[in-house]
Image (cartoon, rainbow, N blue to C red):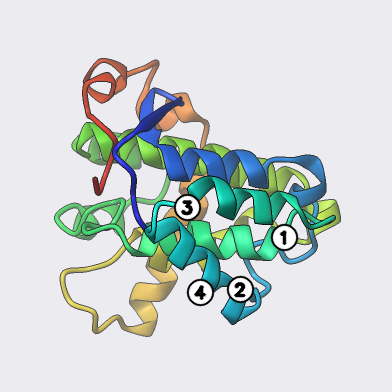
């Protein structure tokens, strides 16, 4: 998915516009409550079509298609957001910090490591965690708990320098991702710790 240069304000600073639009779409109540949100696979051909539109500069047309379905095309929007994260040239939690992140057990241990994230990555991570907490808060409807979301998102945001992940790696990254979702923003990032730097970070990770 293309990452446009424009940015939208979210959390402690600007996040890429496409991510912000997808997150806003997913946070609509009728989309947020879709059963299996982020777990259920979307129709492959439809995801491919909308990705082509987004890559081709037809962002408004792609969102009109999502809005045009009664359910907000929840699973297609969720697939596009996950693809956005996977397509980042550098994982959201950066390969350099991976060894330290997977050793952390809670927000207290995570905070000093997260403080070393590039400001644009920190702003996007903060926005993503806010979205995932909203999804988990509706787990009575969508059946997606924080732990279920952690299992899905861990490979999208935490990747080692090598792609040869072991089963132990998968368990550790899921544990860390669950801790990130469960922790309060202030415990992870402080009170606007990244705000000043993120405000000048351009369009976020990617372009």
Q: Which residue is mark 3?
A: 58
Q: Which residue is mark 4?
A: 48
Residue 137, horizontal then vertical, whole percent: 73, 43
Locate the N terminus and report the quarter of the image it occupies. bottom left
Q: Kindly check if marks 2 and 4 are in contact, taking CB atoms under 8 A apart as contact.
A: yes
Q: Which residue is mark 2?
A: 46
Element type at marker 2? helix
Q: Please state which of the two labelled residues, at mark 2 or mark 3, is closer to the viewer.
A: 3
Residue 73: give its label.
Answer: 1
Q: CA distance from mark 4 to mark 3?
A: 13 Å
User: Which is more N-terminal, label 1 or label 2?
Assistant: 2
Residue 130, horizontal then vertical, whole percent: 55, 37
In which image quadrant can residue 161 be found? Answer: bottom left
User: Which is more N-terminal, label 3 or label 4?
Assistant: 4
Q: Residue at x 33, y 51 (%)?
A: 104
User: Which is more N-terminal, label 3 or label 1?
Assistant: 3
Q: Is residue 80 at all visible to an observer of this figure?
A: yes
Up/down of 175 relative to 167, above or below: above
Up/down of 166 relative to 110, above or below: below
Of residues 162 and 78, the one nearer the viewer is 78
Residue 19, horizontal then vertical, whole percent: 46, 45
Up/down of 140 relative to 28, above or below: below
Q: Please state which of the two labelled residues, at mark 4 or mark 3, is closer to the viewer.
A: 3
């Amino acid at each position: 998915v293309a990452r446009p240069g424009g940015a939208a304000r979210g959390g402690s600073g600007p996040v890429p516009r496409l991510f912000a639009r997808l997150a806003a779409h997913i946070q609509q109540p009728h989309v947020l409550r879709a059963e299996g949100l982020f777990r259920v696979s979307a129709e492959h051909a439809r995801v491919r079509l909308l990705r082509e539109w987004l890559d081709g500069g037809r962002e408004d047309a792609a969102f009109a298609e999502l809005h045009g379905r009664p359910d907000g095309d929840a699973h297609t929007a969720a697939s596009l957001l996950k693809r956005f994260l996977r397509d980042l040239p550098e994982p959201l939690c950066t390969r350099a910090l991976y060894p330290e992140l997977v050793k952390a057990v809670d927000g207290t241990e995570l905070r000093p490591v997260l403080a070393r994230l590039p400001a644009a990555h920190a702003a996007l991570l903060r926005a993503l965690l806010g979205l995932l907490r909203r999804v988990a808060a509706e787990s009575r409807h969508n059946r997606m708990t924080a732990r279920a979301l952690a299992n899905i998102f861990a490979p999208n945001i935490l990747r080692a320098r090598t792609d040869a992940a072991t089963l132990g790696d998968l368990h550790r990254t899921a544990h860390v991702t669950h801790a990130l979702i469960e922790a309060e923003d202030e415990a992870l990032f402080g009170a606007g710790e990244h705000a000043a730097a993120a405000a000048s970070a351009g369009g976020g990770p990617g372009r």
